[in-house]
Image (tube, grey):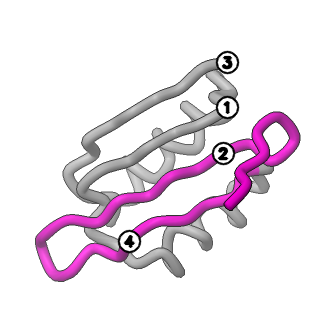
Amino acid sequence: MIVISWNIRGLNSRGKQRYLKERLKKDKPGIMIIQETKISMKQMEGIIKKGKMQYEVMGQDGIGSVGGIAIMWNPNGIIFEN
């Protein structure tokens, strides 16, 4: 299983969003953790849906220019239980 952790320093630019999609499609990680997203989870879900990728996402919204974390996983290979 591939796990990727990336401090992206903001996912607002289209270039970084494009790179994220390319990376997910190329490497096909089981889990990807993105720190310092600086966007909302709603925006993050939109990026995943636009890219037509099979990933679930959860995390904490970025507030202004600070923080935000997203955890994505492939539901076909990873099962999270509470």
Residue 65 appears left or right of 11: left
What secondary structure is found at the residue carrying circle 1?
loop
Label 2 to label 3, Cα distance in Å?
Answer: 11 Å
**Label 1 neighbour load within 10 Å: few <14, some 14-19, many 20+:** some
- Give x and y (percent) for residue 44: 51, 67
Main SS category, magenta section: loop
Tell me if label 3 and label 1 are in contact, CB under 8 Å.
yes
- Give x and y (percent) for residue 38: 26, 68
Where residue 60 is drawn, which disc sits there?
4
- What amino acid type is highlighted by mark number 1? Gly
The residue wearing badge 2 is: 73
Q: Which numbered disc flags the more N-terminal residue, 2 or 3?
A: 3
Label 3 to label 1, Cα distance in Å?
Answer: 6 Å
- What amino acid type is highlighted by mark number 2? Trp
Q: Which numbered disc flags the more N-terminal residue, 3 or 1?
A: 3
Q: Residue 50 versus residue 39: which sits nearer the camera?
A: 39
Rendered view: 7 above or below 39: above
Label 2 to label 1, Cα distance in Å?
Answer: 6 Å
Q: Residue 64 versus residue 1: which sits nearer the camera?
A: 1
- What amino acid type is highlighted by mark number 4? Gln
- Give x and y (percent) for residue 52: 78, 56
What secondary structure is found at the residue carrying circle 3?
loop
The residue wearing badge 1 is: 30
The residue wearing badge 3 is: 1
Residue 74 appears left or right of 66: right
